[in-house]
Amino acid sequence: MAAGPAVGDTAPEFELDSTQGLVRLSEKLSHGAVLLVFYPGDGTPVCTNQLCDYRDNLGVFSKLGVHVLAINSQPLSSHENFAKAHELPFPLLSDPDRKTCKLYGASGLFGMTKRSLFLIRADGTVLYQQTDVPIFRRTAAELELIISERLKR
């Protein structure tokens, strides 16, 4: 499996369907930094806790000028149901052929998406990259410290 972009690399461009329409990374970056959240599955306990934590703390990300995009390989219909059930205000992107997951080194065994985070500055530079064991996740509070420190550089 490819490792994906490292800190300091330029983030690979992508365009994917989402719960909020077509999303192109470069277009999102034109409005500020982006936090890409690769997660294994809609409705799973750890993923639900993670994305609901980010929902509940969206003001933290907004204050830092960071847009949250969550991605996995499940179909858009699954994402729509998941987003509606948990009132997720950020786009959930569907990558059914796993091309974007592979570009970012977030494609795991048996087609499952690896839990990974990428903070990308508006100029497209990767400022932070983290891949976690599936049952662990970074909280919004942890990310606030990381993001604020990385964006100052």
Image (tube, rainbow, N blue to C red):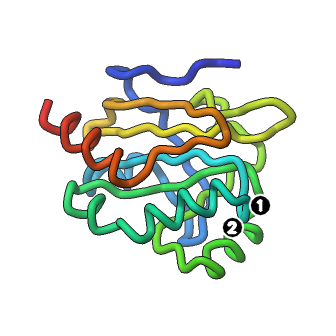
Residue lying at 52% horizontally and 73% vertically, measured from the top left: 88
Q: Is residue 24 left or right of residue 143?
A: right
User: Tag on residue 109?
Assistant: none
Question: Is 39 located above or below residue 107 in the figure?
Answer: below
Residue lying at 68% horizontally and 72% vertically, measured from the top left: 82
Question: Is 28 located above or below residue 1 in the figure?
Answer: below
**Where residue 114 sits in the image (x, y, percent)?**
66, 37
Q: Amino acid at mark 1?
A: Pro
What kind of element bears circle 2? helix
Q: Residues within 10 Å of mark 1 (few under 14, many from 20)?
A: some
Q: Residues within 10 Å of mark 2 (few under 14, many from 20)?
A: many
Q: Amino acid at mark 2?
A: His
Dot 1 and dot 2 residues touching (CB under 8 Å)? yes
What kind of element bears circle 1? loop
**Where residue 151 sits in the image (x, y, percent)?**
19, 39
> In the picture, residue 110 is in which quadrant?
top right
User: Tag on residue 79?
Assistant: 2
**Where residue 128 sits in the image (x, y, percent)?**
36, 31
Residue that mark 1 sits on: 75
- Whole-Å distance between the Cαs marked 1 and 2? 7 Å
Residue lying at 70% horizontally and 33% vertically, measured from the top left: 107
Q: Is residue 72 left or right of residue 38?
A: right
